[in-house]
Amino acid sequence: MAENTASALVREVVAAARAEPGERMLALTQLLTEADAAASDVEEVLAAVQESQQQTARLRRRTVELEALFSTARELVRLQDVTDVLRRLVQRAHELMGTDVTYLSEVDNAQGDLRVRYSAGTVTPEFRDLLVPAGYGLASLVADSREPVWVREYTRMADAPHDPSIDDAVAREGLVSFLGVPLAVGDEVLGALFACNRFAHDFTPDQVLLLSAFADHAAAVLHSARVLAENAAARARAEEAYAELERHLAATQIVGGIHEELTAAVVSGATLIDLVATVSDRLGRRVRAVDETGLPLDAGADARAGLPRRRPLTDAIRESRASGHAVAVVDGERRWLVVAILGADRVLGAMVADDEDAVPDDVARPTLERAAQVAALVSFKRDAVSAIRAERRARVLGAVLDGSAEASALSTEVVHPLVGAAAIDVRGREGALTVAADAVGDHGLVAVREHGLVVAWTASVDGPGAGAGLVAATERVRRILAEKLDDPSVTAVVGATVDGVPALRASVERAVRDLRFLGPLGVSGATVRSDDFAPYHVLSSGEPEAAARFVDGMLGPVRAWDERRGTALVDTLVAYFDAGESRQGAATALRVHTNTVQQRLDRIWTLLDGDPADAEYRFRLQAAVRLERLRRELLGLPGS
């Protein structure tokens, strides 16, 4: 049932991402709610889908504009009649701009006067052949600045002198707002393209860019007409440009086909490795998947063979993240294309392709970029499924530990019997459950507790039975949590081995107590075993701080002396008790003279309040010394 829900959720995410802005969001929200997704996860998925919808809408709008430009480019080389080409260009610009009037003015003489040649939307005959003297009106600003110029209300324009005849023609046409862009080739201005409204209007940057694109084409037409009249070779260049355009259109179709294939693979449950294999096959070059640090995701001893060095690779991933495009990496004589796989707020990894000549670059680059977008969807799907599975298994383990569910409930989640437990202090960090559950995998279950996390290990964990295998497995999970959460203080305690749920509960309870026991001792960022602290639990109260107070009360003056003077009195006590209170044995262990050991002991007895001849006092002192040694070993301090 959960798999059906997850599949439906993935399909709905893909469908919503392709829909128009605002569509299908209610259905997606309902599915996420039914999947028991956390509110933060729901908000993150919805935000990502909305962003995808907006980007898709912008791309669709851009496609319409590009098709019009491509059509004009085709006609540029197909049609011999320059007048027909420019008339169509003005008409297409008029339709896409959505303004009331669009017209093209061409330089009419050596003085730089501009005459209206082609227009769309005009109603007065005189405006269709209007001559604007050089230095007057908005046209002069466009020609002189060689930059787009627009005015909200023409009558209020004060940046250029007005000509009465021009003002009359504008008034009869009823025009109010103007946008003009230059038709320029090199250093020469050939004319200007204008879009006008019969009402006050502020033109947007997108409108400026679109009209500028048409103006560039118009300039190309005028320039080509001049060159064609003087040199027949220009016709060959125009035909070559058309062939290049056709090749780009064909490349776009290829890229679109690959994108559809990748999207279908996602819906069918493909993994990131499957996507990489598909892209590699279609591009005819080797493509690899790496994580955000540049480490390959495919296993093997030679996994990094054929990849760039880590530093240039991670630099390229960062650059691709900032630009959103594929980035070329050159390392020695080899070259690669790298594109980052972007999540909502972080880099999920990257695709690295050998830069060969099997497929043109204008196919390889957009293909890799689209593949990275599809890979991000795969990651969203995987993370959603992992989070749902982790929360379900956590509820089962939590219920069994609390006694609200029978031990048989675990049989639906694990196959192997339970062998041990561990407690991990993650300081309540968000996302820790999913990270830990992924790290544990099918070797156990993870539940959330007040202190942090509890892991119930099964017999499938690597290692001989339990023991060292449990410690190694727990340390691996602790290191992953410390890295993913960016918190080196993550601490773990491995409980005693177990043979059933009652023993599991006892092992968990003891491991949790040990976590509280470690804090006052200053132990963090390590994995320890409960058995190491068994004698000291007996000697201490239920207060976690009791053991630390006990050690400080017994050894405080000696530790303070060592810290001030750089001596080794505590180490001398350790060696002395390890040698059965033999000065000779302590001297041998410390590699010093027996008299040195005696002098140190004399100093110690003067610092401490107790009587060294009292057996009870020596017992207490020895317990404190051994606990201090254990603390130093766990912290990796000198002398341990």
Image: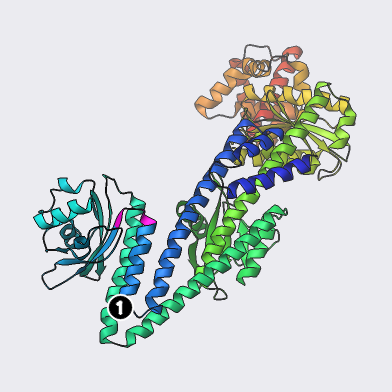
Q: Is residue 477 left or right of residue 257?
A: right
Total numbered badges shown on the rendered structure: 1
Residue 305's x, y, as percent? Answer: 63, 66
Graded by Cα atoms within 10 Å as few (under 14), some (14 to 19) or many (20 or more), the crowding at tag 1 reads many
Residue closer to the observer: 48 or 216: 216
Residue 89's x, y, as percent? Answer: 35, 67
Q: Is residue 54 left or right of residue 121?
A: right
**Is 272 inside the magenta-drawn segment?**
no
The magenta stretch is: 96-101
Quadrant housing residue 277: bottom right
Residue closer to the observer: 5 or 516: 5
Residue 464's x, y, as percent? Answer: 85, 44
- At 16% from the left edge and 47% from the top edge, which residue is drawn? 155
Say above or below: 86 vs 385.
Answer: below
Residue 275's x, y, as percent? Answer: 66, 59
Q: For the C terminus, give its image quadrant.
A: top right
Quadrant housing residue 264: bottom right
Q: Which residue is mark 1?
A: 224
User: What's the amino acid at mark 1?
Assistant: Ser
**Is 98 inside the magenta-drawn segment?**
yes
SS for dot 1: helix
Residue closer to the observer: 397 or 382: 382
Q: For the N terminus, give its image quadrant.
A: top right
